Image (cartoon, rainbow, N blue to C red):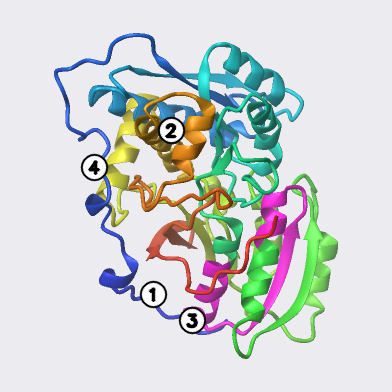
Amino acid sequence: MIRRRRLLLLPALLVLSLAALVAVPGAQSKTDAKPTGKPIVIGGAIALSGGFSAYDLINKVAAQVAVNDINAAGGVLGRPLQYIPEDTKSDLSVGPTVALDLINKGAVALITQCDFDYGSPAALVAQKHQIPAFSCASSPKFGAQDLGPYAYDVSPTTNEEGGIMATYAYNTLHARTAYFLTDTSLAYSTDECKSFMQAWQGLPGTSIVGKDTFSNGDPSIASQITRIKSLKTPPQVIGLCTYLPGGPNAIRQIRAAGITAPMFSGVGIESRDWFKALPTLSDYYYLGYGSLFGNDPRPAVNKFFKMVQALGHKPAAVSLSLMAYTEVQLIADAIKKAGSTSGPALVKALNSFTNVPTITGPVTYTATKHYNYFPVVINEIEHGKVILKGLVQPPKKVPAPTF
């Protein structure tokens, strides 16, 4: 086992004070001027059933929290927001039908699934109808270059995730040899490991001792584990780029095989309780957009998760829900700036955003840059319990995005 040390984060440099950026959810200035008139519709082409509902069901609640908050503060242009979610059933072929139905119901913007592969079909329909589409896809591909000028990503990108994981493994875990296991079933996990490896190779004295692939639905990764155990130089960190629901199965098999090297994964693996089935799991690190357990250094984030729990009647399972709130914030801000709900006017407003405050951090868009870099939290699972290691900013050198 390589030597590890506790992360000491300098608050002035690495911890953002969100209170200085945006009002705490639920604490925006209330007004006696109630929004009136025809509601401004935001459509949600999201997975309310099927595998991706693990992410999108809570995003439905989070988006409604944002709508309630904005309406309590007077709405947008004096009108109330209305959020209409519809089920894509986690089916790529259903997304376009749902998107078109929402547009026919008057949606001026769409929130799509939190994934490039699954969110793109709905976004392409929005593109055709000149309606802005948002996703927490964590991929720069969900933007102007790959989908068109009406597509915007709100999550920290895979290239940021890769840079953060490589930097932390190098500086804090003191790792110098790495092995990468890539889940190739989504662009998200494939791009994440590509960026992780690129950032890793840019650090002095590092080496990649092996790399392999698997698919999220694979029941066994026995052959990959055999290859890890046969390496002449054992890895000091394992980059495991995957997501729910198949990722935990790979983690269980790796640890059951006696491989104890620290493992690192991105936001896609995050869930409130999957690790409870592995009570002895240790030395496992993963990223999140905020701490789910009330100890995030940003008061606005802790307040947000309380409101999500109150509205949804259960705690948020994933921090992706922060991005759903952000998406509604950005849509509302674009409408205010444009003074209109016209799609072309909203795009013009969005592309002029410079450090616009949101719950997750300042947002800047241009005509060609429809993604952002935000702070993320690093969590460690130690003996089956989650330990918050800190809130970190993206490293100065982030691997270039791939389109």
Which one is in front, 355 or 135? 355
Label 2 CA crowd tier, 10 Å (few <14, some 14–19, many 20+): many
Mark 3 nearby-residue class (10 Å; few <14, some 14–19, many ≥20): some
Magenta stretch in the rendered image: 163-192
Q: Is residue 283 magenta?
A: no
Which of the numbered marks, if any, corresponds to residue 171? Answer: 3
Q: CA distance from mark 3 to mark 1?
A: 9 Å
Q: Secondary structure beneath disc 4?
A: loop
For the point 24% across and 41% down, the residue is 24
Give the mark nearer the N terminus: 4 vs 2: 4
Q: Amino acid at mark 1?
A: Leu
199 left or right of 65 in image? right
> Residue 40: x percent and y percent?
42, 18
Task: Give the residue type at disc 3.
Answer: Asn
Q: Nearer the viewer, residue 259 or 392?
A: 392
Q: Nearer the viewer, mark 3 or mark 2?
A: 2
Q: Position of residue 9 (x, y in %)?
A: 33, 73
Residue occupying the point 30% across, 28% down: 70
In the image, residue 177 lies in the stretch drawn in magenta: yes
> Residue beneath label 4, please?
23
Is residue 197 in view from this perspective?
yes
User: Quick one: SS at disc 3?
Assistant: helix
Residue 144 sits above or below residue 199 on the image: above
Lower sequence index among marks 3 and 1:
1
Name which of mark 3 and mark 4 comes first in the sequence: 4
Marks 1 and 4, the one that precedes in the sequence: 1
The quarter of the rendered structure image containing the N terminus is bottom right
Q: Residues under labels 3 and 2: Cα distance?
A: 38 Å
Pointer 2 residue: 331
Q: Residue at x 60, y 12 (%)?
A: 104
Give the image location of residue 256, x and y in percent: 68, 62
